[in-house]
Image: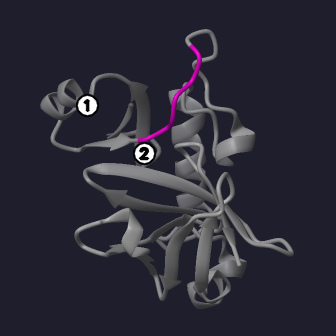
Amino acid sequence: MWWLQLFSCGRGCECLAARECECSRARASCDRVICVRTGDRAQSDRRMPESVTGIPNLDNDADFSNFLCGQAQRSKDPSGFPPDTQDTSDFWHRLQGLWYRQIDGLCVGEICGDSMLWHIHWRIPQGETPLQVLASDVIMFELDGCVNLGKVHLHAQASIHWSDGDVWLQK
């Protein structure tokens, strides 16, 4: 598991630092800590490939926080959208519909508005989870106290590559 902690980076914005640790220790050390699922990795390769997440290597705190700071500084809009894509309605419009896992074709659920409506077979008690935009192609959601970050690819078939290694395809 990874945790993200807000800190002041000295550039006038709050940034996130990422570190690997036990969730219980991370939560005890700071009240602004969030767990992030990043999937299993071999001990010899502790870094998550950027090609999987679409965001900078989480092993490198400076790169990750610079990425998030850079997104926020490119725009006065707190969503982190660059000025030419500040209208998030088009972004969400392109994500509407049913999503399936690439690995086995199971239906994940439906993105409706800016929320995920989970398929009933996942047995998620709340049934609906809000999605948030971090950058023009990065979204996140929190489920059971853990945050998942997703890199959105809007190609012929839209896909989301999640920080836990899961890939969703839109159908």
Q: Residues within 10 Å of mark 2 (few under 14, many from 20)?
A: many
Q: Of the residues shown, which amino acid type is indicated by label 1? A: Cys
- Which image quadrant: the C terminus? bottom right
Residue 56 percent location from the top left of the image: 64, 39
Q: How is the image coloured?
A: one colour
On the image, which quarter does residue 58 sit in?
top right
Up/down of 161 relative to 39, above or below:
below
Question: Is residue 46 shown in magenta?
Answer: no
Q: Nearer the viewer, residue 71 or 147?
A: 147
Give the vertical position of 88 relative to 44 (above or below): below
Q: Secondary structure at mark 2?
A: strand
Mark sitting on residue 23 = 1
Q: Taking 145 as reference, is 48 left or right?
A: right
Q: Which residues are magenta?
A: 37-42
- Disc 1 crowd rating (10 Å Cα; few below 14, some 14-19, many 20+) is some
User: What whole-number distance in Å separates the C-alpha atoms at marks 2 and 1?
Assistant: 20 Å
Identified by mark 2, the residue type is Cys
